[in-house]
Image: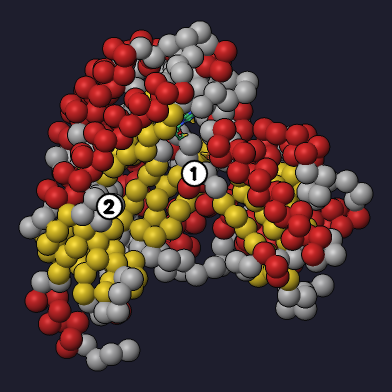
Amino acid sequence: MTETAAPRKRLLIRTWGCQMNVYDSARMADVLAPLGYAPTEAVEEADMVILNTCHIREKATEKVFSDLGRLRDAKRSRGGDMVIAVAGCVAQAEGAEITARAPWVDIVLGPQSYHRLPEMVARASRAAGAVIETDFPAEDKFDHLPETTAPQGVTAFLTVQEGCDKFCSFCVVPYTRGSEYSRPVAAVVAEAERLVALGAREVTLLGQNVNAWHGEGPDGHAWTLGRLARRLAEIPRLARIRYTTSHPRDMDDDLVAAHGDTPALMPFLHLPVQSGSDRILKAMNRGHTADDYRRLVDRLRAARPDLALSTDIIAGHPGESDADHAATLALIRDIGFAQSFSFKYSARPGTPAATMAGPVGEAVKDARLAEIQALLRDQQAEFNRSRTGMVADVLVTGPGRHPGQMAGRTPWLNPVHFAGPMELAGQVVPVTITAGHPNSLSGVLPTSVLATTRERPAA
Ligand code: SAH
Ligand code: SF4
Ligand code: F3S
C-alpha cells in the first residue's frame, strides 16, 4: 500500500511524565503517519490510542490503570474496533501486570522499541492476546525511526541521550530506560538542522542525564556536551539552545565554560539537588555533597552571572530527620531558585530506597513538602519580581490568550505576555518587563520595535 492510498485512521496519544516522553510521543506519531494515522484529541473517533506512561511516582503509575479502565468502555462502544497500546516507563516496568489487569490492551512496548510499532500494529491485528516488546533491543531505535516532517513550533525538543547508570536509591529510571546511551554528533546536528528548517528557533536537548552525553564526533572521539552546544550554536537561525535534565556530578569544566562563551546557550539550568543534607544525599547515592552543589553553582555563576537555576527536591526520603529537612531548607535559601519541582518521596518497587530503614510518615512528608514548596514559591515570585524594569530578549512563541496579545519566553524560561502583532511569532525581540507575577511576566514592546513592525506591510 502506498502512503497516499493508506486509509485515514485516527491516533490519540496521551503523554505523562518527563519531556523525553513528549519527544517520544511525537516520534511515535511520526512512525505511524505512513500507516495513515492522523492525530485526534477525541477518544470516540480514535482507531488507536497510545498511553505513553511514567513510572516515577506511584500516583503517575496509578493514573495509567484508571485511564485503561475508561478506555475499555470506549473500546466496547466501538464494538472492539480500537487498538490500545501502552508505551513508556510503566510498560517497561510492569508489562505483565498491564496485560493481567487490562486484557483489552493490544500492545505493550517499552521506550526502546518505538521503531517497531508499525510491525507490532500488524501483529496485533492477528494476535489473540497482547503483543509485547519490553526487551532492550540490540538495534538503536534512533537509527530506525523516520525523520520528522511535522511542522515544529518555535521551540522543539531533541533527545540526545537516554538511560541512566546512576542508580539513585529512590529512582526507577535506570530500570525503565536502561543504561546510558549518547547519540552521535552527526545525528544530533542533522536533527537540529531539520527542526530549524521546520520552524524551530529554540532546541532543548533532552536526556535523563543529558550532561553525561558523550556522543561520538566526526573525528571519532567522544565530544562533551559543551562542545556539542558550541557546534549547534553555529546553525543559522537556531537562536536558543537549552538542555535538561542535568546531574550535578556530570557538570564538567567545559560545559561550565560553554555557559560563559556561547551566547545561544540560555542562562537557565535545571540542576536537581534532591536534598540539602549530606547524610540523605549519601543514602540517595547521589555522589555529591550539599557543599559540592554550592561550589558548582558558584562556578556556573562565575561563568554566567545572570544564570538562573531550577531544581528538584524530594521531601521525606527514608531516614530523613528534622535536621536533614532543615539542611534542605538551608540549601534552598543559599542558592535561590528561579523555578523548581518538589515531590513527596514515593516508594518504588525494586528500588533500594523502598526497603531502607526509617520510612517517613505521610503527615511528616506532607508538612515538609509544604514548607519546601512555600519557600520555593517565594523564591520564584521574588525572581519574577526582580525582572521588573529589565529589557529582556523574548523569543515570541505565538499569540497570547487575549486578542492582540503575544506570548513568549525570556532567556530564563519565564512566560511573558505583551501586546504586539502576530508577525513577531518566531522572532527574538526586546521586551520591557513591567510586572512579575507568580508564574509569568508582563511586558511591553519598546516603541522602536513597534515602529519597525508597523512599517512592514501586513503579510
Ligand atoms: N535524571 C534526573 C531526574 C529524573 S526524575 C536527575 O538525576 O535529577 C525527575 C525527578 O523526579 C527527580 O529529580 C526527583 O526529584 C523525582 N523523583 C524521582 N524518583 C522519585 C521518587 N521515588 N519519589 C519522589 N520523587 C521522585
Ligand atoms: Fe534517576 Fe538518579 Fe538517574 Fe536521575 S540520575 S534518572 S534521579 S537514577
Ligand atoms: Fe517518568 Fe520515565 Fe520520564 S519514569 S519521568 S517517563 S523517564
Q: Nearer the viewer, residue 41 or 218?
A: 41
Is residue 279 among the parts visible in the rendering?
yes
- Tag 2 or tag 1, which sits nearer the N-term? 1
Callout 1: SS: loop
For the N terminus, the quadrant is bottom right
Residue 286 horizontal side relative to residue 382, left or right:
right
Q: Residue at x 31, y 14 (%)?
A: 322
The colour scheme applied to this rendered structure is: secondary structure
Q: Is residue 455 above or below residue 139?
A: below
Q: Residue at x 24, y 33 (%)?
A: 375
Residue 116: which disc? Answer: none
Quarter of the image holding residue 458?
Answer: bottom left
Farthest residue to the front: give it.
Answer: 363
Q: Amino acid at mark 2?
A: Asn
Q: Is mark 1 within 8 Å of ligand 3?
A: yes
Q: Nearer the viewer, residue 367 or 137?
A: 367
Residue 445 at x, y percent in the picture: 15, 71
Label 2 packing within 10 angstroms: few (<14), some (14-19), many (20+): few
- Quarter, ligand 3: top right
Q: Amino acid at mark 1?
A: Cys
Residue 24 horizontal side relative to residue 368, left or right:
right
Q: Residue at x 30, y 74 (%)?
A: 402
* Residue with the mark numbered 1: 18
Q: Nearer the viewer, residue 257 or 149?
A: 149
* Residue with the mark numbered 2: 439
Residue 238 horizontal side relative to residue 181, left or right:
left
Q: CA distance from mark 1 to mark 2?
A: 20 Å
Q: Residue at x 43, y 29 (%)?
A: 344
